[in-house]
Amino acid sequence: MTTACGRPGRTLIGLCTGVVTAVVVTACAQPAQSDTGPVVPAGNAVSGHVHGLGIDPGDGLVYVATHRGLIRLEPDGAESVGDSRHDLMGFAVTGPAQYLASGHPGELHEGPAGSASSLGLIRSTDGGRSWTEVSLGGAADLHAITVAGSVVYGWDSLTATVQASQDGGRTWVPRSRGSVTDLAVDPVDPQHLWATTSEGPAESRDGGHTFTLMTPVPAMSAPLAFVETVPDLHGDREPDLVGVDTGGRVWGRYGDGWRVSGELGAAPTALAVVGPDRYLAATTEAVVSSEDAGRTWTTLAPVTP
């Protein structure tokens, strides 16, 4: 999140970095082999780079935010949703048929307020068939969006700033500045955030005003690319945080530290944790799903350029 470390606890450009220490990860499970056999008919691949994933609680289907619009994974294959082909970057499912997104207008669409570069925050209330501007049209490109009730956070790639909204995304206040790959918010405490940075996973307890590197720092050979909170925890058997590093290893944070639970087999492009044991992920090759907390993975759809 910052390019240079200050003294322990020192805020740098609105962000804090702590003392970096190594921790021995105990009881690491051996990464399980993924099932890479496609379960959709040939020719029904997801087209375009995948930026976001989610499950609609209304229909139970997986929705895939891509470089060429929103894709719904039906039992018989992948299907484009609606007519827009926006390059959807940040993406979040907020309820049945209700989504938030950001990114860039599709080739046949102009951006909000005449902008050709950024959509700001957009919303769909009809399962992705249509989108309307909420705010920041032409002024922000939110590459990460995370939601807890009416509180929305986003990382704006245009200003390299964590943005915060208390009213569902209508108005925003800039918080800390720095490079972030992903954001996750505590569903119980919206002031509690996590971020993935080039220096390691970081944590904020003041709504994104400041971040501090998590200590002890996980003993990871590759940095986390994505981090997600785990909904509906059933006890200590599930981690409270899940991440995937740039090498494709799946990590969970338990009471005694971080452990490897599985292996994607390739670098991730998206991650969504939709239940205590149900994870979704994407690589440049496939959209995959795990029903056992990341230990094994099944291909939902291949991904083509």
Image (cartoon, helix red, strand yellow):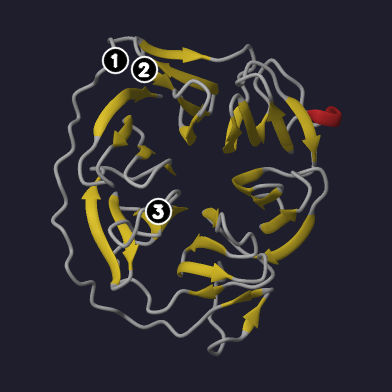
Residue 130 spot, x, y in % from top left: 69, 18
Q: Which residue is drawn at 27% across and 46% down?
A: 294
For residue 151, which numbered disc appears in the image? none
Q: Is residue 19 above or below residue 29?
A: below
Q: Do the residues labelled 2 and 3 touch (CB within 8 Å)?
A: no
- Amino acid at the residue labelled 2: Ala
Q: What residue would you read off at disc 2?
A: 45
For residue 233, which numbered disc appears in the image? 3
What is the quadrant of residue 127 in the picture? top right
Q: Which residue is drawn at 60% across and 45% down?
A: 143
Q: What residue would you read off at disc 1?
A: 40
Dot 2 or dot 1, earlier in sequence: 1
Please tell me how crowded label 2 is: few (under 14), some (14-19), or many (20+) other residues with Cα within 10 Å: many
Q: Residue at x 51, y 14 (%)?
A: 80
What is the quadrant of residue 175 in the picture? bottom right
Dot 2 or dot 3, earlier in sequence: 2
Q: Are marks 2 and 1 in contact (CB under 8 Å)?
A: yes
Q: Which secondary structure, mark 1?
A: loop
Counting labels gives 3
Marks 2 and 1, how far apart in space?
Answer: 8 Å
Residue furthest to the right: 113
Q: In this view, does 2 lie above or below 283?
A: below
Q: In this view, does 225 lie above or below 212?
A: above
Q: Can residue 118 be seen in this view?
A: no
Instruction: Tell me if 226 is positioned left or right of 89 in this view.
Output: left
